[in-house]
Image: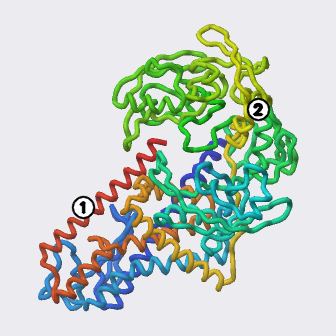
């Protein structure tokens, strides 16, 4: 019984209550929109026959005065029915009742049509005032990671800052840099960085004011950056600065069956005290190839935890290979259970290591992508290793949005030192190490995994090295020329302890102010979201932003429910933002939308009479088809994004 009660409570807190909160919030956004139309119609003397929230079957219906009020099953919209208002069969002026829509002066009808979006803007502004009066925490505007090859990594630092940095680090932002302002506007949250890049114009430059701690002192400085294009496999074309969110040292979601617990705070890694996340990489790099002790603060007690050697990834996200050491790349392992994909249809599972693909041997990640392209739409043999058992399967790669996929998240096969690919011109290629080789020793020291290989090569940096390997049953030993420090520089890699799980993000202190300050911030945020909606639409139209990043009802619902799980105040902010965005898009000059109706009323004003009934009906039908098509397209966008995850 206790277990059942726990399951019910868990289901309520994780699913039912967040969904209810989001549904109530969405109903509120729709309600204020329709309330704007309703109040304006009453002011204009137009008879309102029905005021409904939602679509589908009616849950509640009652009559008050001349108006019927109704609540429908699906809270995804609503409508107001005014006397004589019929998009497909409107009354003529001769037929119109004195209190009908058609009989009202053009000016009053424009007020009625504009009142809905006006109320959404007012609602957003009022909500932002309340939120900033109570206080809200955002992801802090701190550089959590810097991606090589992007503007943040290449930004030119002022001489006084560059001169104080170690050799090789005199350019670019650094993890831990705090962003104080963007184009003179104070940065209150990390999202401002993302929005600035995504909604940027071609060649637009942004002036950043930052703070960095150097030799125990806080130093402020300015850099200028222009966002650069990135082609994301899920979200398509987008523009970025190459700045990652700032993780904290607190474990938000521990790895399953791992030794850590929720809310553990990392205070020491390999004997090195840790104050922030960016202090972790150096001791992880030093621990490559060996077991590691991490000390966490758990229930106010220091608790040591033993973990496996850190895993490694190439730091540059644009590299096709996920890991490369002296030009050698590992085999591929399936990191997540395949879901509704060719891999799932073939019977592949999480943890499978690909031993052979289409008779070409074990592929690296880059070779896997190339073979997917070659065999798109065609059957290919694929051999996998699963818990010591070799399985022969058949797979058919599928092309999605021009990219051939088998539907797996590929990670390096860290635990076995089998070389899947050797890059041309690399030290390994020059030494003659073949693809398929199994590395056994470095400088006569046994190595068993890729982390140990890196540690052994790093220990011998600056001198020559010998590598012993086995290939096709034959043992070989080759010499590698002098290994430069740069070739085994930890800065080339990201180090990670998989048992940690997911770390929470660094958050700001609660941002709150007196009513005047809250009103100022409210105006800034309301305007920001209206401008963001406009720039997003503009960039979509010009092709600067990909449609893959669009979210429709499904995506908004998933995001809204996830935000509702965080806190009520975060959901309130999301609904206020959504209200401002809805206001903008609902006022676009498209048939069926309020903006489209405004255009028709203005045409009537210019002509001196309404458009012919058949023309009006055709315009509305075309509008319905267009809006319906867009609705279906972005809904499929949401669903396909979920399927391909």
Q: How many marks?
A: 2
- Name which quarter of the figure residue 465 lies in: top right
Residue at image coords 54%, 54%: 16
How are the colours assigned in the image?
Answer: rainbow
The x and y percentages for residue 37 are: 36, 81
Q: 278 or 599: nearer the eye? A: 278
Determine if residue 518 is in view: yes
Determine if residue 290 is in view: no
Residue at image coords 45%, 50%: 236
Question: Which is closer to the viewer, label 1 or label 2?
Answer: 2
Position of 108 with respect to 490 (left or right) is left
Helix, strand or loop under label 2: helix
Q: 67 or 601: nearer the eye? A: 601
Position of 57 with respect to 501 (left or right) is left
Position of 583 with respect to 251 (left or right) is left
The x and y percentages for residue 261 are: 75, 43
Residue, disc 2? 458
Q: Quadrant of the N terminus?
A: top right
The x and y percentages for residue 380 are: 40, 22
Q: Are marks 1 and 2 in contact (CB under 8 Å)?
A: no
Residue 419 lies, with reference to residue 579, above or below; the image says above
Residue, disc 1? 625
Q: How packed is label 1: few (under 14 Cα within 10 Å), some, or many (20 or more)? A: some
Helix, strand or loop under label 1: helix
Of the image marks 1 and 2, the number of the one nearer the N terminus: 2
């Amino acid at each position: 019984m206790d277990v059942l009660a726990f399951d019910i409570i868990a289901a309520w807190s994780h699913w039912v209550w967040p969904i209810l909160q989001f549904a109530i919030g969405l109903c509120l956004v729709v309600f204020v929109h329709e309330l704007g139309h309703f109040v304006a119609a009453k002011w204009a003397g137009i008879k309102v026959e029905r005021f409904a929230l939602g679509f589908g079957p009616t849950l509640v219906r009652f009559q008050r005065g001349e108006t019927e009020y109704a609540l429908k099953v699906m809270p995804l919209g609503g409508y107001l029915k005014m006397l004589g208002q019929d998009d497909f069969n409107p009354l003529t002026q001769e037929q119109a009742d004195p209190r009908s829509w058609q009989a009202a002066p053009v000016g009053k009808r424009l007020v009625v049509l504009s009142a809905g979006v006006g109320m959404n803007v007012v609602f957003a502004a009022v909500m932002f005032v309340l939120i900033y009066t109570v206080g809200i925490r955002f992801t802090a505007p701190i550089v959590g990671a810097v991606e090589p090859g992007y503007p943040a990594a290449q930004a030119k630092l002022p001489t006084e800052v560059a001169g104080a940095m170690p050799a090789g680090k005199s350019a670019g932002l650094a993890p831990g840099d705090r962003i104080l302002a963007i184009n003179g506007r104070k940065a209150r949250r990390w999202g401002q960085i993302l929005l600035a890049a995504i909604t940027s114009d071609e060649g637009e430059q942004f002036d950043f004011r930052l703070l960095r701690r150097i030799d125990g002192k806080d130093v402020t400085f300015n850099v200028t950056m222009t966002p650069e294009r990135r082609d994301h496999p899920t979200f398509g074309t987008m523009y970025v600065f190459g700045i990652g969110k700032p993780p904290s040292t607190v474990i938000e979601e521990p790895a399953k069956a791992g030794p850590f617990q929720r809310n553990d705070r990392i205070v020491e890694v390999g004997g090195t005290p840790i104050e922030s996340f960016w202090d972790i990489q150096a001791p992880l790099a030093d621990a490559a190839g060996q077991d590691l002790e991490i000390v966490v603060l758990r229930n106010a007690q220091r608790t040591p935890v033993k973990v496996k050697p850190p895993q490694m990834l190439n730091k540059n996200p644009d590299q096709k290979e996920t890991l490369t050491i002296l030009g050698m790349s590992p085999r591929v392992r399936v990191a997540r259970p395949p879901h509704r994909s060719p891999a799932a249809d073939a019977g592949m599972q999480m943890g499978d290591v690909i031993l052979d693909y289409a008779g070409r041997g074990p592929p690296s990640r880059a070779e896997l992508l190339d073979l997917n392209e070659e065999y798109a739409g065609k059957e290919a043999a694929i051999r996998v290793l699963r818990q010591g058992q070799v399985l022969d399967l058949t797979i058919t790669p599928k092309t999605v949005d021009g990219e051939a996929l088998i539907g797996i998240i590929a990670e390096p096969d860290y635990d076995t030192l089998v070389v899947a690919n050797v890059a041309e011109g690399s030290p390994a290629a020059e030494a003659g190490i073949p693809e398929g080789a199994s590395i056994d020793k470095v400088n006569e020291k046994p190595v068993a995994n890729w982390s140990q290989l890196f540690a052994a090569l790093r220990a011998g940096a600056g001198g020559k090295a010998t590598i012993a390997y086995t290939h096709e049953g034959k043992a070989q030993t080759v010499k590698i020329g002098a290994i430069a420090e740069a070739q085994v520089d930890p800065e080339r890699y990201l180090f990670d302890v998989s048992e940690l799980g997911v770390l929470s993000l660094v958050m700001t202190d609660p941002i709150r102010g007196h009513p005047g300050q809250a009103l100022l911030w409210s105006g800034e945020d309301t305007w920001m979201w209206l401008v963001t909606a406009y720039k997003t639409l503009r960039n979509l139209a010009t092709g600067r932003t990909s449609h893959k990043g669009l979210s429709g009802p499904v995506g908004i619902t998933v995001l809204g429910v996830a935000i509702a799980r965080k806190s009520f105040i975060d959901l309130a902010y999301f609904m206020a933002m959504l209200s401002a965005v809805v206001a903008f898009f609902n006022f676009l000059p498209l048939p069926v939308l309020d903006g489209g109706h405004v255009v028709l009323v203005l045409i009537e004003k210019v002509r001196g009479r309404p458009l012919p009934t058949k023309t009006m009906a055709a315009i509305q039908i075309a509008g319905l088809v267009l809006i319906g098509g867009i609705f279906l397209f972005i809904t499929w966008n949401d669903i396909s994004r979920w399927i391909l995850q």
